[in-house]
Amino acid sequence: MATPTIRQIRAYTVRGGGGDYHDQSGAHWIDDHVSTPMAKYPNYRASRRSFGINVLGSLVVEVEASDGTVGFAVTTGGEPAAWIVENHLARFIEGAKVTDIELMWDQMYNATLYYGRKGLVINTISGVDLALWDLLGKVRQEPVFHLLGGAVRDELQFYATGARPDLAKEMGFIGGKMALHHGPAEGEEGLRKNLEILTDMRAKVGPDFWLMQDCWMSLDVNYATKFATRAWHEAGLKWIEEALSPDDYWGYSELRRNLPRGMLCTTGEHEATRWGFRLLLDMNCCDIIQPDVGWCGGVTELIKISALADAHGVLVVPHGSSVYSYHFVITRHNSPFAEFLMMHPVPDQVVPMFTPLLLEEPVPTKGRLKLPETPGFGVRLNPECKLHRPYTH
Ligand SMILES: C[C@H](O)[C@H](O)[C@@H](O)[C@@H](O)C(=O)O
Ligand SMILES: [Mg+2]
């Protein structure tokens, strides 16, 4: 039987959670005075939405094959990403065989090299790539993790990102990662508050539960070194995450040398492509890389990134990204656990990471998850979420 070709690609936008999980309304732990590079400006210190962390919204990409099968995927990108899909990338997708994913990726990447390479354009290419893997899985009637070589363990295990690692421990997660609240602009008082929060949480979770701190690009080497050293000795901090700008490879290399022996330096969620991650690896920036499969280039690129990291003895624990991360992590020896973002406004209950956009989105029970063997990524779009197609071609 002839291999189906792609009849049409369509790009939609949708607001409110989903792929752009920072796009929340009302009170939410994920936007509660989190330290950011904008915190040096008092007007933008209390809320990340105030400086536009959620301006993009979600991108939904649909690819329809000649046999009627439809694959789709979700990432962060909104209207500008939809424009790129409809006005630029579509020409490399429509008419191609559903199996020619490497070819389509290479053409999308090289055709956008003059204005892409990282950020929104690679988010967009990632969204198309994930939709193509979903389509191929549906055409072949296999879950994506089977197409990637199959599971190397029975189930996934997760650490939880949220404001309550103590609740995460009770729910069975293997660790808890909190957002840092105070950056260098808040001086010694802010540093003291950061450490108080951490030592209080250590007292609640006991000596062995993993505690991590996400700094969301907001620190400098000196502050990160001071904070991490005290957090290691006073609260047993397991890792300090994304302390510096994603472009400060030199700073990460220095910070990692500064950290107490045994403490981990992690980063990568805002890095993209094998070349970006090669820089992090070759410059000894971190012990764990955390690519977001919806932002780094998709599954096709994450395969390459992961192999590079494996050769360097560096773990790959993808940032968030729901099923798109789970189907990859379950197939890789150097991805021993995954992240679960607690997306309920008060992190005392488990809700799907991309809620409310995906139906059948699996969630961990007692911090663990056996991936269903449903074709593709195994999820459906929630028909109650109104999609908007701002551009056509
Ligand atoms: C919790 C962090 O501040 C970010 O909101 C989160 O998206 C990311 O950095 C993470 O590692 O989950
Ligand atoms: Mg992070």
Image (cartoon, rainbow, N blue to C red):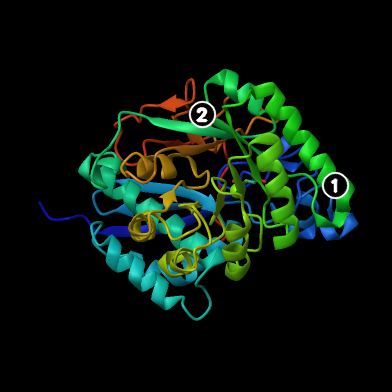
Residue 348 in sight here: no
Q: Is residue 193 left or right of residue 381?
A: right
**In the rendering, at what x and y percent does residue 134 appear?**
34, 47
Residue extending farthest left: 1
**In the rendering, at what x and y percent does residue 289 appear?**
48, 54
Tell whether circle 1 marks a residue whose Cβ is less than 8 angstroms from ligand 1. Answer: no
Q: Is residue 147 left or right of residue 131?
A: left
Residue extending farthest bottom: 114
Name the mark on residue 190: 1
129 shown above or below 33: below
Marks 1,2: beta carbons within 8 A: no
Q: Which residue is mark 2?
A: 174
Task: Name the quadrant containing residue 140.
Answer: top left
Residue type highlighted by circle 1: Gly
Residue type highlighted by circle 2: Ile
298 shown above or below 363: below
Q: Residue at x 45, y 55 (%)?
A: 127
**In the rendering, at what x and y percent does residue 359 appear?**
47, 31
